[in-house]
Amino acid sequence: MPSFTNKRRKLFAVALTAALSLGALATVPATANAAPTQGHVVLIGGAIKPGDAPSEAIIQEIVDLAQAHAGAGNTPRVAILTAASTVAPNATEAADGNTYDNATANGLYYKSWFEAHGAEVYPVPIDVNQAEDYPGDPYTAANAFDTTVANEVRNSDAVYFGGGDQTRYVRSLFSCTAPDQAAADKFAYTACTDTPAMAAIREVVESGGVTAGTSAGLTIQQGADMISGGDPYQSWRDPAVTGWFDDNSADASTLAYIPAGGLGFFTEGQLDSHFARRDRQPRLVKLSLETHHERGFGVEEKTALVVDRGARTGKVIGALGATMLDVSGATFDGKSTAGVRYSYFMTGSTIDFATGAITLAGAEHTGAGTAPAPAAEPDIWKSSECDSNPYIFGTLSLTQSFVKSSASRASGDSCDAAVESPRFRTTFNRDDRTRWSDDGSFVDVAMSIAEIPSFTATASVSGSAQLTIGDTANIAVSVTNTGGTPLSNFNINGVPTAATTVLPGASAILTITHTVTEGPQTVAATVTASAVDTNGADLNMTTEPQAVSVELSGAAKPVDPKSPPATENPDPKTPVKDPATPPQARALATTGAPSPLLPLGFGALLLAGGAIVLSRRLMVGGR
């Protein structure tokens, strides 16, 4: 183990005395999110590597912050935690940090990298297994209780957490409990206390030091309800569950979380890594809504969000950007949401966590852009069922194209595959709060997610088929909800019908009236509806309109044979003919597409015949 400098020895002695006065085992819960006081949190989205310019800049940022904590003239010291990695199976693989990926080898990997940036490094010999994994294995979970290990960590200026599986950090750095054995078996912990090593990490950060991490090392920085897994589609379709699932299990795609949470150093919301690249927006929105957190943050690969805990501010450095998903004003009925505020801010941008205000690095624009409206995305979450290169910026790319366009709304649907049914639609709306910049950043795009809304409509003439000029034709428009979302606010040619909500699978009758004119005539109409959630809240997404039409023919009114003919000097020898029977109207099936209304079609007929009367009759249906 590296030796202490004289100054470090004095600092260590003071810190150790204070720690001993509080007892050997700290009892700070992992979920305790006290107001931050000092220190920095560097949240790295993943995939950093030596030699990559953005990655090198991130490592240097950590070392610079550690230097500020160490003080001028002292070498900054970084403790490296790699317990999220799998354990080393043997001494050969443990000793080769350039070739193998395990907790011991990764400690050597990061040691070399941080030393190249001028730091002194202590690889913390902790992995997830209590016992040795091979003879002479220096990494065990038991070392989290070793006072020598804790003292080495306490003597550091920064603590860095490598990638892997964040639940392994919970299992190796805390003593946790669960409601029962079944919950404990899947790590669904509800309360945790610090081991001596974790208590030492906490001292480093709360003294003004640095905690940093990549991938799983990012996710572990948050407090309660830490995400532990879940694919985008399954995360939205199914409720979140507590615990963790192995990647090879049947439940590997399920949205899961650890109630007790992580380290609790980042207190501004929930966290997720590898974010837009893997289209993780739906899983973070869903978890935030279900666990009642107002904000969620995601960070891109080779990118870091550097957080000043005392000032409650952050800045983005590296290759790409960070995401904030604010659900504080969103509606949610368990299946659908609307009003999520989606922001993505690139490198150089900053955020004030106290207010949620984001300052973009480039020149900001409001209102619409000039680019063409983006096409609807048929696989917005880039599922492996539909795409050979899954999870590559589907949601982010569509939103970036949308904000620069002249459109006020854009949408994309989930993959059309049998195993991913039902399908969901994500809709983006621009409003007076939306801002964007040319580099791809945007702030406050309104986002909705729900099952794709759809309906069918047909029209037929009801009542008497004997239609003459001046008669009122009653036209019944039957609508059936064929989607998975309730529909309301039905309009026919832009005129609202009587208020009704049609649930999935149910039908309703909407009636319009038309004053018959002479000769053949087509009565055409376009039916529109709004998607709403089960509480009636508007989901602000597009439902495809449906076109209906019927053909009528108006005949002259028959002459009453008992009435004298309305002619001058009638010839009594000329017989009066019986009136012709007008043809019966016939219904036309819906075209299933928006109606190409004739220039002098239904609207003109309505103007000639008077005001339109709309009503409705609910029909039995639904599921």
Image (spheres, rainbow, N blue to C red):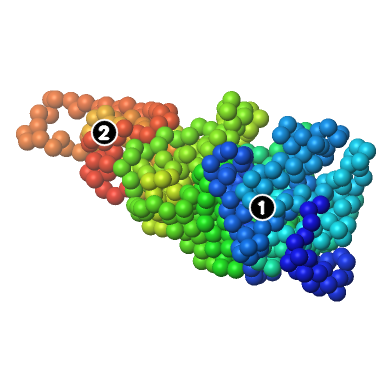
Residue located 66% across and 39% down the image: 231
**Residue 412, position as x, y percentages in the image:** 49, 38
Amino acid type shown at disc 1 = Ala
236 or 395, nearer to the observer: 395
What crowding class fits label 1: few (fewer than 14 Cα within 10 Å), some (14-19), or many (20 or more)?
many
Residue located 82% across and 46% down the image: 127
Q: Is residue 275 above or below residue 316?
A: above
- 138 left or right, relative to 216: right
Amino acid type shown at disc 2 = Leu
- The residue to which callout 1 is attached is 119
**Quadrant of the frame with the C terminus:** top right
* Mark nearer the viewer, 2 or 1: 1
Q: Which numbered disc flags the more N-terminal residue, 2 or 1?
A: 1
Residue 294 visible from this viewpoint: no
Residue 68 visible from this viewpoint: yes
- The residue to which callout 2 is attached is 598
Secondary structure of the residue carrying numbered label 2: loop
274 or 493, nearer to the observer: 274
Query: What numbered label is drawn on residue 449?
Result: none
- 584 left or right, relative to 389: left
